Image (cartoon, helix red, strand yellow):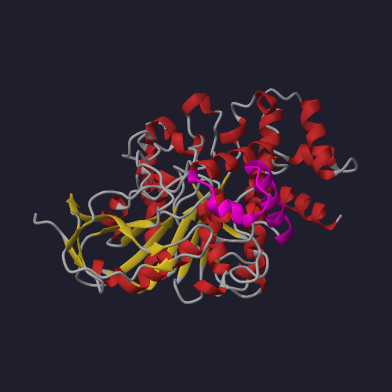
Amino acid sequence: MNTPIASTPFGDFAGLHRDGVNIFKGIRYAHADRFRASELATDTWSDLKEATTYGPQALQVPGIMEQMLGESKQPTSEDCLSLNVFTSGNGEQKPVIMWIHGGAFTNGGGSVPWYDGSNLVRAGNVVVVTINYRLGAFGFRGRDNAGLSDQISALEWVRANIESFGGDPSNVTIMGESAGGASVVALQATPMAADLFAKAFAMSPSIPQYRTRERADENVAELLAAAQVDHPDDLVRMSADALLEAQSKVLSTTRDQMTAFAPAVDDHYLPEHPSALAALDARPLVIGTNRDEMHLYTAFDPKVSGMNEADARGFFRDNFGSDDAYDVYARYRPDHSPGQIVSALQTDGVFRRPAHDLADARHRHGHTTFAYWFTFATPVFDGVLGSCHALDIPFALRNLDRNGVEMFTGTSDLRTGLAENFSNAVLDFARSSEPGWSTWGESRVTQILDTHTEIGRDIVADPEPDIRRCWEQRGTQ
């Protein structure tokens, strides 16, 4: 086939064609000065611009998740604001899915192989966009929220250009996992993205990463101390390598690594906590978690996996108080080891309870919300990872064929049906705002996603209600 050409309002791009999919890589969508909000790229050109190579990722030190996902081999740079488009070509306007990568707001990139949009395009005749955005101190220094401004700029680029790639700018779904899922919720919350997308799909959003104004200001002080400078302006003049080194020092010494660098309440993008604002957003939301999210981090940590029952009960006592801690422990999956029960408690605290709290709040405001629970347990490493964090990504994006996936998911043929079910739900939601099951409400309807389940049939009302009540009682103490 001839080289695919996309003619945008600003100039023409030449891409790649692979097995029925046109791919345009490394397209600049915005410009930005350090710590400043990004601005939509409006440069024009008259020659044919090559879009065949991924752009550099944001500056970072790759973490365990990136290594496991088959981290992108792209170089890193402070000048990283590029995106990639996967499409079947022009013709009728197709639904658009903009994928926002995870990585704790400090790692990752849109070129990670597991995020490739080609299989979704082939399966559902959609347009997929994957993006880079600034990370760590470069994207989330104090209250700057520069990384969030990048995501908004990417959506502005989609609105202005995606029709040239066969996409429908009025039917954009934002989608992401982990920090990407938290980004989805933050974009629902910010008034700056009020008219930039139609619906949202948040996978395992790390909602507790959001920072208060006070925590954001504390972060600036930590960063100044790590960089051994006195004023925030000094950080602007530092070399990128020196600032990245200071960021690493903060992450190794801060009192709370999870909230070191992440979206923060400010006076512009997020005037209130993102969950509170997202609860008021009328656009449809799919939100879900994995049953054993924290097993990714605890399964090989002897401090957790090696816990005896007394240690585990002590952990519950610290979290629920002495009066009811043992009763709560008894309600948590008695077939698990003590360490796995602690990991389940952490999973609920970081992922499931915040997601369900948001779903409850949205229901109270009358806004459409769908919930799922991914329970497929990977057999690798003798099954100790369970349904861990990030395991659902290749199923949702139909990327079981990507390098390294089998090392994470196993090789069972049963995986194919789950990938088809999950990715079809994603595609149906992108097309029609309906994933195929009932909305969350008073009965807390939840779609179970596993190798033996079917969309729309394997529905559970209020999974594990005893555990939910324990958390609700804890919240009123």
For this orientation, the residue located farthest to the right is 323
Query: In the displayed structure, would residue 139 be above or below residue 72?
Result: below
Query: In the displayed structure, would residue 455 be above or below residue 173?
Result: above
Tell me if 11 is positioned left or right of 170 in this view: left
In the depicted view, which residue is nearer to us: 384 or 102? 102
Residue 268 shows in the view: yes
In the depicted view, which residue is nearer to us: 401 or 32? 32
From the image, give the main secondary structure of the stretch colored magenta.
helix
Residue at (63, 52) in percent of width and height: 209
- The range drawn in magenta is 213-240
- Quadrant (top left, top right, bottom left, bottom right) of the C terminus: bottom right
Quarter of the figure with residue 445: bottom right
- Magenta span has 239? yes
Query: In the displayed structure, would residue 44 be above or below residue 437?
Result: below
Q: Position of residue 179 (x, y in %)?
A: 54, 51
What is the total number of numbered labels drawn onto the structure image? Answer: 0
Query: In the displayed structure, would residue 93 be above or below residue 252?
Result: below
Q: Position of residue 103 (x, y in %)?
A: 51, 45
In the depicted view, which residue is nearer to us: 454 or 149? 149
Quarter of the figure with residue 279: bottom right
- Quadrant (top left, top right, bottom left, bottom right) of the N terminus: bottom left
Tell me if 27 is positioned left or right of 471 in this view: left
Q: Position of residue 199 (x, y in %)?
A: 47, 68
Residue 333 shows in the view: no
Residue at (59, 34) in percent of width and height: 297
- Magenta span has 221? yes
